[in-house]
Image (cartoon, rainbow, N blue to C red):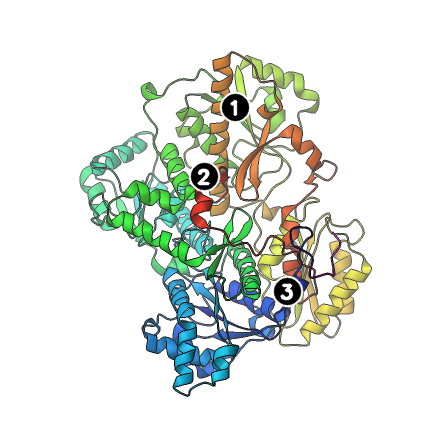
Amino acid sequence: MKKTDDPAISSTSLPRYLEHLSGDGKAIGVLTSGGDAQGMNAAVRAVVRMGIYVGAKVFFIYEGYQGMVDGGSNIVEATWESVSSILQVGGTIIGSARCQVFRNREGRLKAACNLVRLGITNLCVIGGDGSLTGANIFRKEWNGLLEELAKNGEIDKDAVQKYSYLNVVGMVGSIDNDFCGTDMTIGTDSALHRIIEVVDAIMTTAQSHQRTFVLEVMGRHCGYLALVSALACGADWVFLPESPPEEGWEENMCLKLSENRARKKRLNIIIVAEGAIDTQNKPITSEKIRELVVKQLGFDTRVTILGHVQRGGTPSAFDRILASRMGVEAVLALLEATPETPACVVSLRGNHAVRLPLMECVQMTQDVQKAMDERRFKEAVQLRGRSFEGNLKIYKRLAIKLPDDKITKSNCNVAVINVGAPAAGMNAAVRSAVRVGIADGHRMFAVYDGFDGFAKGNVKEIGWGDVGGWTGQGGSILGTKRTLPGKNLEKIAEQIRSHSINALLIIGGFETCDRIKQSASGTKRRVFIIETMGGYCGYLANMGGLAAGADAAYIFEEPFDIRDLQSNVEHLTEKMKTTIQRGLILRNESCNVNYTTDFIYQLYSEEGKGVFDCRKNVLGHMQQGGAPSPFDRNFGTKISARAMTWISDKLKGSLGAGKKFVSDDSICVLGISKRDLLFQPVAELREKTDFEHRIPKEQWWLKLRPLMKILAKYEASYDVSDAGKLESLRQQQGTSHGEPAAI
C-alpha cells in the first residue's frame, strides 16, 4: 500500500506510518528488574534500536532500580552497536537487582534526580508485577518528587516544568507466565524448552528401569510451567497451586499410576509446581509425593528439581520474536504517551500486540493470589485467563480415561489422517484427537500413509493406550505423503463406506513447520547465507530473520532485484567497518528462480572481498526433523482437541436431526486468525488462497517484515495503524466470544 505523506490524516481513514511519529528531543531509559528471563536482551536491543531509529536518545540503566538510585556510571547512553550480538544471549546484559531503597520515597527521590539531570522522562521497565508496580508508583509521585528536588536546590525550577511528567511502559519478563493480560511473558517459552529437554532425557532412562520420576518445576504462585509441561509430555499427574487435587488424591494418584503400569507403560512422570498446595493450602512437596509412591506402590521413584536451569540458556526463537515485537511496541507507546496516558504494559494476544492498563493487569494478578489464599480455587483458575482454564480442562480430558461403561456411546466412527510434509507436533495432534474422540464416545480409526494408504485400506481402529508417549515423537507415526486424493477418490469413498466413517480429521495440508533456530555468532567479520524451507511461503525466512537478527531475508512475497542485492551488500560492508563482526542473510528456497543461494553466496563473496568472508548453509529437511518444540506439542494438542469437539458437536447435530452434512460449514479448516482460534469453511478459503504457490493471498506476518529491516538499520515504512489503542483487560475478558489462540 502506498505511503501517505500527510501526518494529519486520521488513522481511521488511512494507514498510519512510523514516519509520522518522532522521538526528537526525547530520552528513554531502559532497565531490567527482578528475576532474569531469557529474551530480556532481545527486548533491550529492540528498545535501543527502535528508539535511536526514531531520533530519541536511549539510556541503559544498569542493575535495575538500584542503578537508577545510585546514578553515575549506572546510567549510560546506548549506541546502535552496544546491543549488537546480544539477541541470542540469555539473562540480561544490563543486569538486574532487587532494590529495597527504591521502595522508600527517599530512594525514589534520588532516582528522579538522576533521571532529570539526563533529561530522561520515558521509562521502559522489563520485569515482573513487583517491578512494574514500583514504576507506576514512581510515575504517580514524579511531579511531587521534582518539586521537592527544586525546593532542595538539587535541580532548577525550570526543570520541574520542562520534565513535568514521566511516561512508563512495561514489558513482562517472567519465566512463570504469572502476569494476567498477556498470553506469554518473555522467557516462558525458553523455560518450557529447558523443562521438556530434561523430561525427554529422563524418559529414556525411566523406560529402561521402569521408574517413576517426580519433576519439580518453577512456579511458586503460578502453575503455568507445570501445566503446559504436563500437556507437552503427557504426564500422569500434575500438581498446581491454582487447582489443588481433591480430597483423597493420594489414593487416586496411586491407582492411576498402577493402572498405567498394568497397561505395560514402563514409566510414570509426575510434574509438580514448586508452589503446589492441597485444598487446605498446605504444601505438597516433591519429596512427599516420592515417599507416597514408594510406600503405597513400591515403585522405584526419583525426584528431579530443575531449579535455575529453567532460567538459563539461549532464548528460544519464540522469545526472541516476542521480545523484539514488544520492545518496538513499547517505544511506540512512549512516543504517543501524554500526561493523561496511564502506565501501560505491552502484551501479546494471539499474534497481535496490544496495550493494556498496567495497574489493571497487576490488580488481576494479585486477585489470583488472593483467591488462592482464600481457597477460592475455581475462581483463581478463571482469573488466570481462558487459556489457562482451557489448558487445564484439556489436560484432564487427555490424562484420565473414564471406564468404558461410563462413556456414553455416540455410535459414530471418526478417522484421523496425516497429509502433506511431516511437521513437528503432528503426533501430539493425533494423540489429542484420538483421546478426545474416545472420551466423546466415538470409535476412532487411524489412516496410515496418507491418502495413498486410505485408498489401499490401511485403516485400523486405534485405542486410548495406543497413542501413549506420542506427544514428544517427531515426524508422523501414522505416516504421511504429499499425494492428494485425486484419482483415488472412489477407492477412498469405498473405504469410508466399509468402515462406516462419519467424520474425517485431516492433520497437515500445505507444508507447515515451526522449527527454525539460527545462531551464526562467531568469527571475525563473517557473513552467513542460510537457505530455509517453506516452498513459496517466506514465513520461516522472515520470522527466523527476526529471531536471529538477520540483515536481510529474501522471500517470494516481496520481489527483489539485483539493485536490492547490491544495496544489501553495501549495507553489510559499512556495518563490518564498525565493531559489528557478524552478518546473517536468509533466503527462502523458492524466493526467486534466478537469484539462487549459490548466486547470492558468490555475489556477497566477491563484493565483500577484503572486508568479510562468506559461508553458506542449506538447512534442508533438518528443519522438519527432531523432537517437536513445547509450542508445537501444545499447539498440536489444543487445536486437535478443539477440532474433535467441533466434530462431536456436528455429529450430534446431524444425528439428532436425522440429516447428512450438505452445507459448506461441514468442511472447515481450524487455525489462528488474529487473536482467536477460528473454523473457516474451505469454500470461503478458496477465495483467499493462491493455490499455484500454496500460500494465502494475504499473510499476516508480512506486517512484521519492516521490523527486521529497522532493527538491522535499514530505512523502512512501518504501518502502526494497529498500535495506540489502550484496551481494558476486564472488558476484553468479558466481551470476547472467540476461543483464545494462546498456548
The amino acid on which the numbered mark 2 sits, given as a three-letter code, is: Thr
Label 1 secondary element: strand
Which residue corresponds to the image point at 37% horizontal and 19% vertical from the top-left?
408
Find residue 592 and report its horizontal and vertical position in percent: 77, 50
Name the residue furthest top: 658
Circle 2 packing at 10 Å, graded few (<14), some (14-19), many (20+), is many
The residue wearing badge 1 is 415
The tag earlier along the polypeptide, 1 or 3, is: 3
Label 2 secondary element: loop
The tag earlier along the polypeptide, 2 or 3, is: 3
> Which range of residues does the magenta coloring cover?
1-8
In the image, is residue 19 part of the stretch drawn in magenta? no
Regarding residue 441, the answer to whether it shows in the image is: yes
Left or right of residue 413: residue 359: left
Circle number at residue 21 = 3
Measure the C-alpha gap from mark 1 to mark 2: 19 Å
User: Of tags 2 and 3, which is closer to the observer?
Assistant: 3
Measure the C-alpha gap from mark 1 to mark 3: 54 Å
